[in-house]
Amino acid sequence: MISFAQINKPSFLKSFVYPFSIDYETNQHQILMLFNKATDSFEDFGDEFNDLVDGNIFQTLSRSLMAKSFNLLVPSIFKKRMSEKLISDTVHTFKEQTVDQIMDSSYIREVYGMITSHETIKILGNEILTVAFKIPQIDLNLINKAIKENLQNQQIYEFIWLTLDQIHFQTDDIIHHLSGIHVENLLKISDQLKIGSEFNIQETFEQTEKNQEKIEKAEQPAEYAIILYDEREHYQNVYESLFMGNFISNNNEKWTFYKAYDLEFPDEKTLKNLKGIILPGSKYSVYDESLTWIEPLKDFVRKVYYDYQNIKLVGICFGHQLIAHSLGGKTEKMKQDVSNCMYIGKEEIKLQNTFFELPFVQKVLENVDISNIRINPLILNAVHQDHVITLPQDAICHGSSERTNVEIYTMGDRVYSYQAHPEFSYYHMKEFVINKLFTWGRLSESEKETLQTEISDDRLLMRQFILKTIKTFIKSEY
């Protein structure tokens, strides 16, 4: 029997990150590495998981990539003409940033988008996530010069291209400087790049059986989808990173994303293959009929629930309200006579006995001893002004709070839903909610400080426990 504390352990504890490009002269793939002069060895751009700073492995590797590349490998930077001035200015600006500023910058959301992209190679191993993504060919002499001039304490690092031939044949100039794990990872990436190149060739002859199998695998339909309906810039790529980072499990697993505010929804072919859909939070209200996309979104929820028994639905905050409202329940403001009744902070949720009887919760609890841990009431981060007041006919409530009677509900084995935000860490509450509201003038300085103090106790064990139950539910691992 493992301890309850071990539920905190994420699926991936280490990330390896390898940018790659194509040498125009040799037409060969090359991998960008860091050469550490102090240790006389090559390093990648990944890092160890850090739950105190990040929350999931996608954020860990995004932060690490930005820090180790001095922001030079952010898409909006490397897609520009990499002039000496641009490189120098980027490195110099990075030098002045704190960890919080890195995590709160628009750059990290660009990296989230790059990491969650279908085009990014992701290799999932035992507690290891290896990522490779394509960048333009860049002049490393300019980069290394900028590092030397702007970051005196970073002169031990030098950017270097390694060709796949050097890695495959382990030539003398790298064999003594490249660790076994890097060789193993890079050979796997090389195999993926080779397969990818085969797909890009328009063959005029009949495909061999082997190539046909590869193509079918590459065109594997998505298994999981996230429906997005918050178009604000500071949420760009955030929900994709949060849920994929917590729930992705294997190399063959494909996730896809749809912008409901642009009337994007999965087509019939995709719906037939989907196993789960996540409906996350939003600033909007599900009863706001002025939104042109709100009724099509409700129609979509009804269509999935009634016509596609293969799909499980997970609702969070707005998604929680959306499912209930679409299927016969009712959502309204928590206080009808108050224009702004938004609650931000820790929500104390009283769990019903039925919660512990849910099969996916029992599955998680099979290997977890909670005899000495207080899990009821459940403490989660919350930010909302609407709540569900009436559940659909077939729904069962499993938790309530002082603010709302419906904090958690299920509908058979199809729906599992939370009003609170188990995916939001202290960092996300601080940067994406509290600091933004303060910047927009909706919180005073004293209110901001009070809220930041209140949410500083992340209750990581509880969040990870609930995320584990959601993952078990949506993947039918029970």
Image (tube, rainbow, N blue to C red):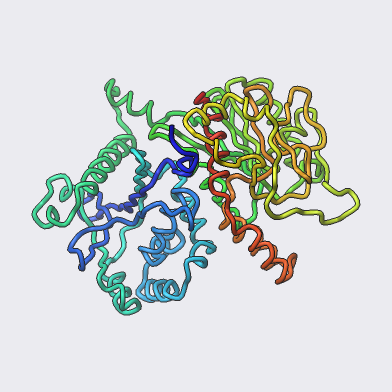
Q: Position of residue 234 (x, y in %)?
A: 60, 58
Classify residue 388 as left or right of residue 60: right
Q: Quadrant of residue 44?
A: bottom left
Residue drawn at 26 percent across, 68 percent down: 157
Residue drawn at 29 percent across, 66 percent down: 139
Classify residue 189 as left or right of residue 461: left
Of residues 97 and 145, which is closer to you in this image? 97
Check the image and name the residue furthest to the left. Answer: 172
Q: Quadrant of residue 189?
A: top left
Does residue 195 lie above or below 116 as drawn? Answer: above
Q: Quadrant of residue 197?
A: top left
Check the image and name the residue furthest to the front. Answer: 372
Classify residue 303 as left or right of residue 250: right
Of residues 12 and 6, which is closer to you in this image? 6
Residue drawn at 69 percent across, 48 percent down: 347
Does residue 69 lie above or below 210 as drawn? Answer: below
Q: Position of residue 205 (x, y in %)?
A: 28, 25
Q: Position of residue 70 (x, y in %)?
A: 38, 67
Q: Position of residue 338 (x, y in %)?
A: 87, 54
